[in-house]
């Protein structure tokens, strides 16, 4: 298979060799400069976020030198409000006074309607407000999360998009999976000229309101009335709107996993995220294992078991994976890329697969290290 020519501005291009069928035992390191069009740009619309907070908190955060690293503000009834920042393990109290019911009610009036998943947003922005309710249904706590449209992450996987293969992202909450989906939607629709449809269950990707945020480019967005209906809206998108790409966040049920397989079998490219930090989490999750081909127990004959030097009952992948690539987002700028089929087969045989490590160096250039031995913990 020929290499893929990837434009990086200025008329130049770099050749990326496809994932090879045989992995060499050595590591190849490639350093990629950021494309001029992918300079890191952050649009957080922080002013709209601060408007829903009490006046004293708004003033403090507006003058906070770390406001660009603000992740979320926690407001729980009867407790001091707390701010959490990127890269800091704990939170910081914003004042000594406790949050009152009146302050919670004022915040509720300034955000959109809470859905069945207790999430709301601020119209025209990417901010997310999540509610905690008491037994009577009254809101007694709010998690106000800053939504940022970040452009520039795309160079971490720009070469993979040229394959037209489905990609699954896994990683802990807050590592930036939804931010990456948002930029992939923009690039595939605007630069690759693909027909992209986003299944936006909680309005996290396209923002709150009927008009989606400009961060998703020319992609179309389908909202989901209830989280439990996400799989039906996924199928509806394929049947009614002829997409070339479907983007879906937080695949978490067996019905959604089966919908993904149905979509992939129709030749539609899938970009999604799933609950789990590593590939092993998906393998061991019976609800989601179909995303990587499903796992079944196979009984070998005596001769075959001796030839493989293994026990007679073994685990094997039972079908082709729905997602050709799986990317573990360990950190915002440190990813591990798997060719799903090969990595799953190797792990089930008790061996370490060969993977790509994609990271940024001190100069913020993307470094791709091929092919590193994967141990499931770190590289």
Image: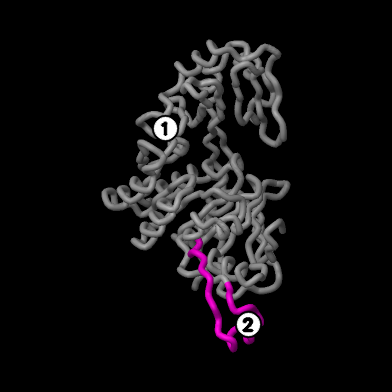
Colour scheme of the picture: one colour
Please identify the quadrant where the C terminus is shown.
bottom right
> Relative to the observer, which residue lies in front, 214 or 375?
375
At 42% from the left and 32% from the top, the residue drawn is 116
Whether residue 299 appears in magenta in the rendering, the answer is yes
- Residue 343, image x, y percentages: 59, 66
- Residue 261, image x, y percentages: 40, 59
Q: Is residue 219 visible?
A: no
Whether residue 192 appears in magenta in the rendering, the answer is no
Q: Which residues make up the magenta segment?
A: 292-314
> Relative to the observer, which residue lies in front, 132 or 261?
132
- Disc 2 and disc 1: Cα gap in Å? 51 Å
305 left or right of 87 in image: left
Instruction: Tell me, yes or no, whether the two marked residues, 2 and 1, touch with CB atoms within 8 Å.
Output: no
> Relative to the observer, which residue lies in front, 191 or 157?
157
Residue 222: give its label. none
Judging by the rendered image, the residue that carries numbered circle 1 is 116
- Residue 231, image x, y percentages: 38, 48
Q: Secondary structure at mark 1?
A: loop
Pointer 2: residues within 10 angstroms few (<14), some, or many (20+)?
A: few
At 46% from the left and 52% from the top, the residue drawn is 271
- Residue 323, image x, y percentages: 48, 60
At 59% from the left and 58% from the top, the residue drawn is 279
At 66% from the left and 16% from the top, the residue drawn is 60
Q: Is residue 254 visible?
A: yes
Residue lying furthest bottom in this view?
303
Q: Quadrant of residue 210?
A: top left
223 left or right of 22 in image: left
Pointer 1: residues within 10 angstroms few (<14), some, or many (20+)?
A: few
Judging by the rendered image, the residue that carries numbered circle 2 is 308
Say whether disc 2 or disc 1 marks the residue closer to the N-terminus. Answer: 1
Residue lying furthest left in this view?
240
């Amino acid at each position: 298979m020929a290499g893929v020519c990837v434009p990086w501005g200025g008329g130049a291009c770099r050749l990326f060799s496809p994932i090879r069928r045989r992995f060499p035992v050595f590591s190849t390191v490639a350093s990629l400069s950021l494309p001029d069009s992918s300079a890191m740009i952050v649009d957080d619309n922080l002013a709209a976020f601060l408007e829903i907070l009490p006046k004293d908190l708004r003033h403090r955060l507006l003058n906070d030198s770390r406001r660009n690293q603000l992740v979320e503000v926690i407001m729980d009834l009867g407790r001091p409000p707390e701010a959490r920042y990127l890269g800091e393990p704990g939170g910081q109290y914003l004042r000594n006074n406790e949050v009152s019911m009146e302050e919670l009610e004022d915040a509720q009036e300034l955000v959109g309607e809470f859905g069945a998943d207790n999430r709301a947003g601020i119209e025209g922005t990417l901010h997310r407000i999540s509610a905690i309710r008491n037994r009577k249904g009254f809101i007694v706590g709010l998690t106000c999360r800053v939504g940022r449209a970040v452009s520039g992450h795309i160079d971490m996987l720009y070469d993979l998009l040229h394959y037209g293969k489905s990609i699954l992202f896994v990683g802990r909450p807050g590592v930036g999976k939804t931010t990456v989906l948002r930029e992939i939607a923009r690039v595939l629709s605007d630069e690759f000229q693909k027909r992209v449809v986003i299944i936006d269950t909680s309005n996290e990707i396209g923002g709150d309101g009927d008009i989606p945020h400009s961060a998703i480019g020319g992609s179309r967005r389908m909202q989901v009335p209830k989280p439990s209906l996400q799989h039906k809206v996924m199928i509806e998108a394929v049947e009614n709107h002829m997409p070339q790409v479907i983007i879906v966040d937080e695949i978490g049920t067996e019905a959604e996993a089966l919908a993904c397989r149905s979509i992939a079998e129709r030749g539609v490219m899938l970009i999604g995220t799933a609950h789990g930090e590593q590939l092993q989490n998906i393998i061991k999750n019976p609800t989601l294992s179909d995303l990587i081909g499903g796992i079944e127990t196979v009984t070998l004959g005596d001769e075959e078991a001796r030839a493989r030097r293994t026990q007679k009952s073994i685990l094997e992948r039972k079908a082709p994976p729905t997602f050709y690539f799986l990317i573990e987002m360990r950190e915002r700028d440190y990813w591990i890329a798997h060719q799903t089929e090969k990595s799953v087969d190797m792990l089930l045989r008790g061996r370490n697969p060969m993977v790509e490590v994609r990271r940024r160096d001190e100069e913020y250039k993307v470094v791709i290290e091929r092919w590193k031995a994967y141990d499931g913990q770190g590289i």
